[in-house]
Each structure stands twice: as structure tokens, then as C-alpha cells.
Image (cartoon, grey):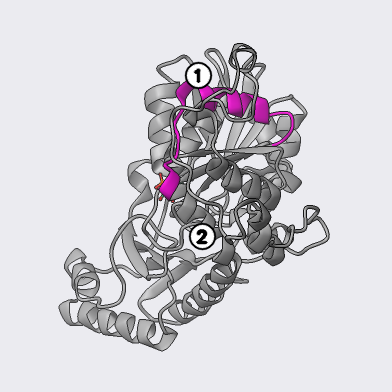
Amino acid sequence: MSKTPPRDRSRFQADTRLVHAGRDPSAQQGFVNTPIYRGSTVLFPTYDDIKNRRGRYQYGTSGTPTMDALSDAWSEIAGAAGTVLTPSGLSALTIALMAAVSAGDHLLVTDSAYRPTRIFCDGVLSRYGVEVEYYDPLVGTDIAALMRENTRAVLVEAPGSQTFEMQDVPAIAEAMHARGGAVIMDNTWATPLLFPPHERGVDIAVEAGTKYLSGGSDLLIGLVSATERWYPAVKRTYEHFAPCAGPEDIFLGLRGLRTMGLRLREHGQRGIAMAEWLQGRPEVARVLHPALPSDPGHSIWKRDFKGASGLFGVILNPVSEDGLAAMLDGLELFGMGFSWGGFESLVIPFDPTVYRTATRWQAEGPALRFHIGLEDLDDLKADLEAGFARMAAVA
Ligand SMILES: Cc1ncc(COP(=O)(O)O)c(C=O)c1O
């Protein structure tokens, strides 16, 4: 017989919880990992049970032991009352938003939000009668001045997607809570390991598990965790749409969870090392990374965050498009692709001027977003150095 795992893990550190949360070998013939339950139909033993809908499991969409393993583990790690799993980070954001606002409500959305979140707000929420207003991510306590009688929720993202502004989440939460509304956060960059959302005033936190939970660029999954007050609304909204994550993807998520702390530390340290190196390059005008002391968001990051992940931005000095293309096209180690959080290094060009509405994005030259993977740092630097040389040759 296998040992019963420690049920009260409150005395353990995050790394220990990551290893033990959401699995019970003593309940699965001693096997270390929770098995994959696939299924739509759940059989009820008696007429009385089916009539009274008795039993934890009743239908494939509303829960399986595999789903529970990850959602319970995530709630434990995030310090949440409950978590629902969805098939992507974007679908998790849509569930979080729909749980918090209704027709006639006013929703404040940071101008630095992940762009597809904006597209959902403008394309779906607006169509269903929600007033969507974008605000300056650096607003801080002044957010109170933007709140109206019908403001029911504020969406924050820190650091901002692509542009990496730090938001004062506790200050924004205080202002929103004074009006009884919900603070929703896209916490994908930090994960609950580096920014414990519910301790910092967030009511509904979203994680694109596609990134660091997976760690392998091989999985799409979303997680929505919420406080006691907001979890029932999140769960109800989830049940209305039933956007179930697939059992194999949940299994991969559980596998990723065990090593997430370790990987994040590596991504974070490497990211900072590369950001510092890039800051010293003549081709670079500015680095957008809240862990750098020169970053305008550094003091908030230091106050509220426990570390950094591996994603940051760089503003280059003015350079021709041909020069930029020559740099990027010849890279051997940095891939060009949108999703991030895997073991590999990535770079993409970005231009926030095309979607920002509440603030004006001003930059010295073209902008690049880097994700630093687990390759050797000297190899990565050599790849970029060769890229800068190609850039100079074209210029
Ligand atoms: C900050 C952020 N939030 C959410 C998402 C959406 O995640 P998914 O790709 O799983 O829909 C992404 C994806 O790039 C992201 O960068």
C-alpha cells in the first residue's frame, strides 16, 4: 500500500505543494499520477441517486477526477476558493469577464491588455450591452475617478501584454472594492507563484496555462481561479458554456505543474541576464522589464512580485525594416512565434500603436518581445550578436 499524502499542506512551501497538490497515490493503486478519466456519461447506482442528482460526478462537462486534480491543485497554489479549467487562456478570460459583467454595466480594461481580450470586449461584450472603457495602465489610485455608478469590474494585466507596464493592482483593487465590483486579472506573466493574485486583491484571476503550466509549447489550456465571493459566478458561467479542457491536456497540465517553480526560476534568471545584456547593446534604446532597476515599474514589481518570468520587451534604436528583417530572419536559436512560456527562446516584432486607444505608445524605434528559454545564454547572445551584425550590414 502506498502512503497517504499529507492532506494539510498549509505548512509547506510552494515547491512542495507543486509536487503534492492534486494527487493521491493511495487512491490510485500507488501510481504517482492521477489517471486520465475520459468520459461523457456517468452512471448513477439507483433511481434515488439519479432523481436527486446525488454524487460528485454526474456528467463529463461538470467535472471528472482528472479535472478536479488540476483545478484543486491550482486553487491551492493560487489561494483561491475554486478554479475552472478551459481549453485556452483566451476562453478563460472570456469566462472571467462574463462572470463579472452584464448588459448595462461599465467595464474598465487596461490599455495594455492582451489584444485578443480587447477584441472580445469590443466584439462580444459591447454587442451584449456592456460599456467597455480602456484606461491608462499607469493610472494607479486615479482609477477611482474613472468609476461610474454602473462600473462593475476592472481588468488588469501586470506587466502589460507586449509593453510591460507595471500596474498597481492593490491600489486598483481597493478603489474597485469600495464600489463592490470585481477585479479581474490576466496573471499569465507571473503565475500565482510570482504574484499571488487573491492575496493582492484580485477577485478573478486568469492564467493561460498554455504558457508556463505547460512549459512545452505543446498544450492549450486556461485556468480561472476566484475568491469565495466570486467563484459561484465563475462556476455558473462556466456551466452555461461548458468549455471543457480535454483530459489529455489537463494531464499534461498536471505534469507541467510539478516542475513549474523550477522552470520559472530558470526563465526568470535567464530573462533578467539577457535583458541586462540587451540594455548594454548600442542597437537597443530601452528594455521593458520590470525587474530592471531602471524600469519605471520596478518599485511596484519589487513590492508586489516574488520574481520575474522570462518574457520582456526591447525598443530598438531607429532601424530600417530591411535591417530588422535581416536580423530576425537569420536567427538560428530564437524562433518567431506568438505563444510563449515553453523551453525555447522566441522573439516577435510588435506594434502597439495599431490597437491602443486610451494612451499613445511612443517608442524610439521598432519593438521586439523576447521569451528566454532554457538554452545556454552564451549561445543565445551569440545568435543575437550575429543578428545585430546582419542588421548593421543592411543599414
Ligand atoms: C498575456 C496572455 N494572456 C492570455 C493569452 C491567451 O492564451 P491562449 O493562447 O491559451 O489562448 C496569451 C497568449 O499569448 C497571453 O500572452
Name the mark nearer the viewer: 1 or 2: 2
User: For the magenta stretch, what is the residue range?
Assistant: 227-248
Residue closer to the observer: 306 or 238: 238
Quarter of the figure with residue 313: bottom left
Residue closer to the observer: 160 or 98: 98
Query: Could you say whether the residue bearing mark 1 is in a helix, strand or loop?
Result: loop
Residue closer to the observer: 45 or 133: 45
Q: Quadrant of the C terminus?
A: bottom left
Residue linked to disc 2: 255
Q: Residue at x 54, y 70 (%)?
A: 263
Residue density around tag 1, few if under 14, some if 14–19, many if 20 or more, within 10 Å: many
On the picture, is 262 further left or further right than 391?
Answer: right
Residue 357: percent from the left, percent from the top? Answer: 42, 37
- Please say whether residue 232 is one of the residues in the magenta stretch: yes
Q: Residue at x 40, y 17 (%)?
A: 127
Residue 116 in view of the camera? yes
Residue 52: percent from the left, percent from the top? Answer: 64, 13
Residue 219: percent from the left, percent from the top? Answer: 39, 53
Residue 132: percent from the left, percent from the top? Answer: 49, 25
